[in-house]
Image: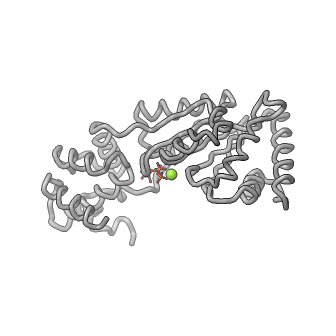
Amino acid sequence: MNEQNEPMVRFFSLTVLPFVKEILAEELWMPPSRQLVADEICEAVHDRAQVLLDGESGAGKTCILRAIRMRLPQEGYRLTYCHNATLGRRDFYRQLCVALGLAPCATAAAVFYAVSTHIESLSRDRIHPVFLLDEAHMLHQDTLDHLHILLNYEWDSRALLSLILVGLPELRDRLELRKNRSLYSRIERRISIKPLTANDTHEYVRMRLRRAGCDRELFADEALQLLHEAAESSLRNVDRLATAALRMAARHKKKRVERDMMANVVGENQAEH
Ligand SMILES: Nc1ncnc2c1ncn2[C@@H]1O[C@H](COP(=O)(O)OP(=O)(O)OP(=O)(O)O)[C@@H](O)[C@H]1O
Ligand SMILES: [Mg+2]
């Protein structure tokens, strides 16, 4: 359905659906706490360091990567984004090859050789490759076992690339295991996305509504508070619950979501899960 024909969009005179994942990188919600995370990662990449970014599902990790892509200067960096972390070691290296524009090779050793020579030539051209590995909590152990080798180059005097490992909090738990210490000890920056404060959630909702052409308060303060608690620091949950609440309000011809209506939506949502 065309967004403008959505009853909720029409009822609230919005320009678009407010809580959707299709959001431009330059329009992301980046309060100072998130700017800081993005700055830290950019700084680490600038220093050719390795990064771990962890946070709960829906906290906004992948969106922060999008913000970083926009900030890093095009010249001097080659960003490669990979979110298919479930691959075994050989397929993982093949994918890295493809992402770097190289012909995939047959064996892990050949791929490793191709990747390292390519990266060396980038380095001669003063281009630093940055490999963003999303959903990294799903990496196979044999891939994880091998990753530190990419970070140990020329007698461990430099890293071939900046590795940004992004995943759920269990990724950090896995990396902390003794068997992963060769990799973990080389990851200098370890950043967690902090839980949302009530104020964060309120600001986020207002920002999303503003982007959809609405400056009015569509949620009563108490409803927002309830939304904040139910979302458990996941912006994806905020999106889903806020959308459901606005749809319900439009169906009932209410111009504002009050606490009771939000409680209904939260209750229905819990029943579904
Ligand atoms: N900075 C942001 N600005 C605007 N919307 C955001 C932002 N961060 C997250 N969102 C919203 O929350 C949704 C989930 O964010 P994202 O996909 O980045 O979470 P995630 O932490 O990567 O989750 P997962 O661990 O499940 O992959 C996005 O689709 C978007 O709608
Ligand atoms: Mg993600």
Say if 207 sits above or below 268 in the image. Answer: above
Q: Is residue 50 left or right of residue 135?
A: right
Say if 104 sits above or below 216 in the image. Answer: below
Front-most of residues 155 and 60: 155
Q: Which quadrant would residue 68 be assigned to in this image? A: top right
Residue 66 appears in view:
no
Give how far across and how far down residue 114 sits, in percent.
85, 49
Q: Quadrant of the N terminus?
A: bottom left
Q: Residue at x 31, y 46 (%)?
A: 205
User: Which residue is most to the front?
Assistant: 178
Q: Residue at x 27, y 62 (%)?
A: 269
Say if 185 sits above or below 106 in the image. Answer: above
Q: Residue at x 63, y 45 (%)?
A: 132
Q: Is residue 232 left or right of residue 126?
A: left
Front-most of residues 246 and 224: 224
Give how far across and how far down residue 197 sits, in percent.
31, 37
Q: Is residue 205 left or right of residue 142?
A: left
Front-most of residues 236 and 270: 270
Give how far across and how far down residue 204 sits, in percent.
34, 43
Residue 156 appears in view:
yes
Give how far across and how far down residue 60 sits, in percent.
45, 46
Front-most of residues 161 and 175: 175
Q: Quadrant of the C terminus?
A: bottom left
Q: Residue at x 69, y 31 (%)?
A: 48
